[in-house]
Image (cartoon, grey):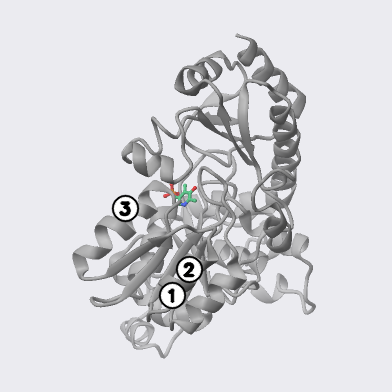
Amino acid sequence: MTDSTQTKPSRTLRSRTRQVRAGLARTGYSETCEALFMTSGYVYGSAEEAEESFDGTRDRMVYSRFKNPTVAAFEERLAAIEGAPACRATSSGMAAVHAALMCQVKAGDRVVAPRALFGSCTWIINDLMPRFGITVEFVEGTDLAQWAKALSKPTAVVFMETPSNPTLEIIDIPAVAELTHKAGGRLVVDNVFATPLFQSPLALGADVVVYSATKHIDGQGRCLGGAVLGSEDFCNDVLGPYLRHTGPALSPFNAWLLLKGLETLDLRVERHAANALKVARFLETRPEIARVLYPGLESHPQHALAKRQMSGFGGIVAFALKDGKAAAYKLLNGLEVIDISNNLGDSKSLATHPWTTTHQRLTPEDKLAQGICEGLIRLSVGLEDADDLIEDIALALAG
Ligand SMILES: *Cc1c(COP(=O)(O)O)cnc(C)c1O
């Protein structure tokens, strides 16, 4: 028994309050913390009730592949933070990307995306979609002329990540949204690096936002999860049936972890960003480093654009060591606090060598085209004391 009247205030709440309270639907036990409904199905008081639940006369949950109270609480809270009309949770970030794209395309459609993408997103667009007769075109994300040319033809979907992984390229969301709409398509933005706190793609003109909740939304390296946000029409009529029948449902347990993660999202993300800026400024002073990429640095090629469309710059920094792979390995192996890991958005600082791990499968030419060189390190700056992180890097550089 939920008593939602008890937990739904009459006035509009501010963002920080929504992070802690949106989606809260207490049961008859009046618990403080959100309940965890670890159930796959639901029971009916009578055969008539079961029938009415399936023919739509009665609005209730029938199966956790379709809907679950804990998953629904997470969806409602994330939608409230994002300022999105609707949200659907998925079992991982890639399930979210896959469903958000595949639910709306058919043979003969055209899809456009920037070259710099998360590896599995590239695979969906470049390897999977063409198998089903979808034409794909890649552009240089930071070059609006290339977007304009690619979107001069009718296009069903545009997919982008901004900032991109791992080179933190910033793409102009309002400009690409306008071109996408003129081409008759929807713009889907993977907002993982920015988080819901620092960038609102829907307000900037995008149609759909996707998250890997595995990253900052959980933020503590505990579970996988994903989410797709957009209009009621898109989430209910286009995405809804695709999720319902293909089944990438989020576990209620993971939804509960993610729901609790959202309560501290702004505190954590603010600290990630403050630490990242400190670390990036330190890296800029080091002679061993050729280039530091962080959208909050004045030296970032799209810093002005980042300031226009983001309210903060996130917790990921990338930097290239002058002496290539050997120097990158020496640094990684010399770290004592920062861990070597391909994950990101964790409370613990994590460093990765994209050339040999996350982007290993790409050809050297493709890696270089994405700005990934052999000396590049991607650092997900955690919640530790920034001075300990700086000391750790300084000692590892000194060898
Ligand atoms: C991690 C990540 C994904 C995939 O998310 P999973 O939860 O690992 O499936 C997609 N896009 C970006 C930008 C990511 O960083």
Q: Are marks 2 and 1 in contact (CB under 8 Å)?
A: yes
Q: Name the residue under label 3.
A: 123
Disc 3 and disc 1 in contact, CB within 8 angstroms: no
Residue 227 rendering spot, x and y as whole percentages: 49, 61
Distance from the alpha carbon under mark 2 to that under mark 1: 6 Å
Marks 2/3: CA–CA distance: 20 Å
Which quarter of the figure has residue 53? bottom left
Residue for badge 2: 147
In the picture, measured across the screen, residue 385 lies left or right of residue 143, that is right
Of the residues under marks 2 and 3, which one precedes in the sequence? 3
Camera-side mark, 3 or 1: 1
**Residue 100 appears at what percent x and percent y?**
41, 67
Q: In which image quadrant can residue 250 be found?
A: bottom left
Q: Which of 391 and 10 is in front in this view?
A: 391
Secondary structure under tag 3 reads: helix
Q: Residue 22, position in %: x, y?
A: 67, 66
Quarter of the N terminus within the rendering? bottom right
Q: How many C-alpha atoms fall within 10 Å of the one at disc 2: few (<14), some, or many (≥20)? A: many
Q: Which sits in the foreground, 19 or 139? A: 139
Secondary structure, mark 1, is loop
State the residue at coordinates (70%, 37%). Answer: 276
Amino acid type at image mark 1: Leu
Q: Which numbered disc, 2 or 3, marks the residue closer to the eye?
A: 2
Label 1 neighbour load within 10 Å: few <14, some 14-19, many 20+:
many
Total marks shown come to: 3
131 shown above or below 5: above
State the image coordinates of residue 247 (x, y, percent, origin top left). 32, 63
Disc 1 target residue: 151
Q: Observer-nearest residue: 306 or 3?
A: 306
Question: Disc 3 marks which amino acid?
Answer: Trp
Q: Distance between the residues labelled 3 and 1?
A: 21 Å
